[in-house]
Image (cartoon, rainbow, N blue to C red):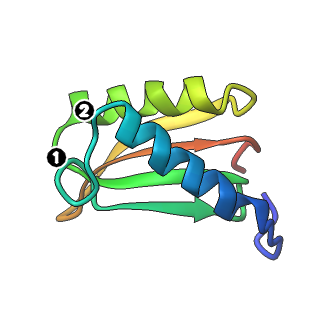
């Protein structure tokens, strides 16, 4: 994990993730609140998901889109809903 790394191509990957979510039938602000880049882990986080099963399906969709990224998880954030995170680099 590199806290000070900046990878501008992640912004393009964010756009790819938004397109994949739309193609998968997920609507921004209805099914999820945000797609954020994880610069330190070289990855993405989809947050504000209403339930765990939807978060798991979103994570599976992201895994198909970014097949070289092998680290991912679904977790619950207090008062912010579920999130699906997928990243290339391991967390430490």
Residue 80 against residue 17 in the figure, above or below: below
Q: Is residue 60 above or below residue 62?
A: above
The x, y position of residue 65, in whole percent, is 59, 30
Q: Which residue shows up at 67% across the image and 58% down it?
A: 12
Q: Is residue 32 above or below residue 2?
A: above
Task: Measuring from the top left, give residue 27's x and y in whole percent.
Answer: 25, 48
- Residue 10, image x, y percentages: 70, 59
> Judging from the image, what secondary structure is the residue with disc 1 in?
loop
Residue 8 drawn at (x, y percent): 77, 68
- Residue 50: which disc? 1
Task: Kindly identify the residue that appears in the image at 46 percent across and 50 percent down.
Answer: 18
Left or right of 54? Residue 11 is right
Residue at the image point whose x is 76% and y is 71% from the top: 3
- Name the residue located 57 percent from the left edge and 23 percent from the top edge: 64
Residue 81 left/right relative to 91:
left
Q: Are there few (<14), some (14-19), or many (20+) residues within 10 Å of tag 1?
A: some
Please report contact status of discs 1 and 2: CB closer than 8 Å, yes or no.
yes
From the viewer's perspective, tell me whether residue 19 is left or right of residue 31.
right
Please tell me the numbered disc located at residue 65. none
**What whole-number distance in Å separates the C-alpha atoms at marks 1 and 2?**
7 Å
Q: Which residue occupies the foreground of this view, 18 or 44?
A: 18
Q: Which residue is mark 2?
A: 54
Q: Secondary structure at mark 2?
A: helix
Using the image as rendered, state which of residue 32 and residue 81 is in the foreground.
Answer: 32
The quadrant of the rendering that contains the N terminus is bottom right
Q: Please identify the quarter of the rendering in which residue 60 is found.
A: top left
Q: Is residue 11 above or below residue 73?
A: below
Decide: few, some or many residues near mark 2? Use Cα within 10 Å; few <14, some 14-19, many ≥20. some
């Amino acid at each position: 994990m590199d806290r000070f790394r900046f990878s501008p191509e992640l912004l393009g990957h964010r756009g790819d993730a938004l397109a994949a979510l739309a193609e998968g039938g997920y609507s921004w602000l209805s099914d999820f609140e945000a797609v954020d880049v994880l610069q330190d882990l070289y990855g993405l986080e989809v947050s504000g998901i209403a339930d765990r099963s939807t978060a798991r399906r979103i994570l599976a969709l992201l895994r198909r889109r970014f097949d070289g990224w092998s680290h991912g998880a679904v977790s619950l954030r207090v008062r912010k809903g579920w999130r699906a995170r997928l990243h290339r680099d391991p967390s430490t």
